[in-house]
Amino acid sequence: MLITDEYVPIIIASTAFLVICLIFLSITIFVRRRQNQREMRLKIRSKEDDWDMSGDEAASIEFTDDSASFLTRFLHSIGAKMNRSQSGDETEIKLKFLRAGLRGKNVPTIFLGIKLVLAVALPSSFLLIVVLFFPSMQTSHIFLGMWFLVMAGLILPNMWIGRKARKRKEKLVRAFPDALDLLVVCVEAGMGLDAAFRRVGEEIELSHPALSHELNWLNLELRAGKSRQIALKNLAARTDIDDVSSLVTMLIQTDRFGTSVSKALKVYADSFRTARFQKAEELAATLGTKMIFPLAICLFPVFFIIGLGPVVLQLYRVFLGN
């Protein structure tokens, strides 16, 4: 399909707008990485025994007279007005942000404010670029581009939250086996379960900050007076991992029936390790089947060309050549 002259302005305008967005996104990612590196260096150099909830894995947005920026307050005010017209389960909404590592009562309203601002700012920027550089663009194309950007402004934040939650869940899944082994060692050494959770959180703070933060939050809930059963259930809900849910169920049953926590943890750790080995063996067994399609598509045609190509050329020269 050939591109006619009437589509050239909208393509150029869309490309220019996309380039500007990518530039701002690159600057944001660069600044964020530098900030994370600086925070990691400060953590490594710190000699304090106390560990707090600062950092990316414990992102919390609260308002104080000194720390709240104008942009944060502006987004919160817009999100608060938008939140009044929406209905839904607030627990599920808060849980979605908790699983993404975002805490604070103001996070949902700020998130709604960001969606509304993007839904207005993106089409407005596109319209400004069109008016300044491509005034001859057709009105239907302008409305189509603005409608697409409005939908993008409403959908992209949800996609970002989902992606952030998935990445954080992957970090928690990778950190869980190490934390479980450390928990078993601490309990077998004579520590209480609450103290063992705190100790494990301290030990894995640098290697697995996401799980360390969740264990720290569990300890804070226990200190605040919540029962161990409720705090453990909250941990399972925040992490959304089947292995953590199984561990929580086992600990609750152990506490309810009065059995030995160390023996139960040791049995659970052994069964969990066996399940991991079986899962790895299952993935290795399916490797041959998964390799069939790449081999058939990429390698076998090359082998046929190399092996049969000279023969086909020779037959062509003998029977059909002049």
Image (spheres, helix red, strand yellow):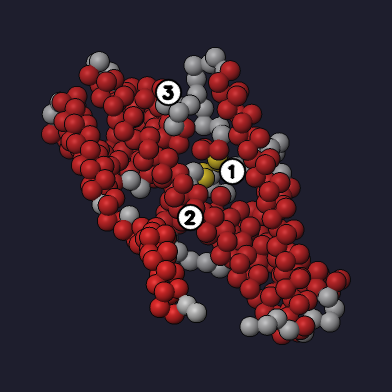
Q: Residues within 10 Å of mark 1 (few under 14, many from 20)?
A: some
Left or right: 64 with respect to 284? right
Sequence-first disc among 3 and 1: 1
* Amino acid on which the number 1 mark rests in the picture: Ile
Q: Nearer the viewer, mark 3 or mark 1?
A: 3
Q: Nearer the viewer, mark 2 or mark 3?
A: 2
* Amino acid on which the number 2 mark rests in the picture: Gly
Q: Which residue is mark 1?
A: 61
Q: Residue at x 71, y 46 (%)?
A: 27
Per the image, label 1 sits on a secondary structure element best described as loop
Is residue 301 in view?
no
Check whether the beta carbons of the residues at disc 3 and disc 1 lie within 8 A of each other.
no
* Amino acid on which the number 3 mark rests in the picture: Glu
Instruction: Say which of 47 and 24 sits in front.
Output: 24
Question: In which quadrant of the rendered view does residue 290 lie?
Answer: bottom left
Q: Residue at x 54, y 55 (%)?
A: 160
Where 6 falls versus 212 (above or below)? Answer: below
* Residue 300: % across, % down: 37, 60
Q: Which residue is mark 3?
A: 202
Number of numbered discs on residues: 3
Q: Mark 2 and mark 3: span between their CA atoms? A: 28 Å
The residue furthest front is 322
Per the image, label 2 sits on a secondary structure element best described as helix
Instruction: Say which of 297 and 39 sits in front.
Output: 297
Left or right: 146 with respect to 94? right
Q: Which residue is mark 2?
A: 162
* Residue 49: % across, % down: 49, 16
Q: Residues within 10 Å of mark 3 (few under 14, many from 20)?
A: some
Sequence-first disc among 1 and 2: 1
